[in-house]
Amino acid sequence: MQTKTHVIDVDETTFQREVIDRSHVAPVVVDFWAPWCGPCRTLGPILEKLAREANGAFRLAKVNVDENQGLAMRFDVQGIPAVKAFRDGKVAAEFVGAQPEPMVRKFIKRLTPTAADQIGEQATALLANHRWAEAESAYRRALQVNPGQAASGLGLAKALLAQGKGQEAETLLASMTGAAEAATAEKLRPLAGLLAEPG
């Protein structure tokens, strides 16, 4: 069994290392299946295709429940195919039964962060550590990847305010229209207005 591939077979002896431990690095989607299961033969190829397309954004681990009944019991598999996604050592999402490819794609998409999400997380950490200029740069990169990402826009405004760049922050805050972000943006606008006034 190769650990570098995006689709692997796991059993009771390798589950901890290949699924639980690995899920701290990237999401691991576990397909609980059996060779006699017709819906499993429909869903399996869809999951494998998406794992190859994702190219490492997540790993697909396949568990034959006939050979690994202990794992099926441990994770309360009531019917197959059962798909459980692990993140940070725990089940983060799951579904039972064969699903059409568009539904499986949505399931996978919710698990795997986009490039903009990853940059945004990095920027948020920089902001929390009072590294304003670096946070500003990272938020700008996140917004280049995904211009509509309101959380990154709000983070950029905060980084700008921390550096005394009130005019640019005020313009940015005025454009915030997302529900949760708009409320925070409105609270920050008076500060941006004060900083934007000529000294």
Image: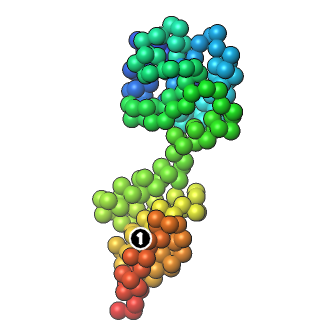
Q: Outermost residue, left direction?
A: 129
Q: Estimate how packed mark 1 is, as few (under 14), some (14 to 19) or many (20 or more) residues with alpha carbons within 10 Å.
A: some
Left or right of 175 on screen, residue 195:
left
Q: Quadrant of residue 109?
A: top right
Whether residue 87 is visible to the viewer of this picture, yes or no, is: yes
Where does the image place residue 62, in percent across and percent down from the top left?
54, 19
Q: Quadrant of residue 40?
A: top right
Figure check: 184 above or below 91: below
Where does the image place residue 101, in percent across and percent down from the top left?
69, 34
Q: Which residue is mark 1?
A: 184
Whether residue 60 is visible to the viewer of this picture, yes or no, is: no
How many numbered badges does the structure rendering display?
Answer: 1
| Element under disc 1 | helix
Left or right of 127 on screen, residue 170:
right
Residue toward you, 75 or 176: 75
Picture residue at 54% right of the left edge, 71% below the top: 177
Picture residue at 37% right of the left edge, 86% below the top: 194
Picture residue at 57% right of the left edge, 37% below the top: 108
> Which quarter of the rendered picture does the C terminus lie within?
bottom left
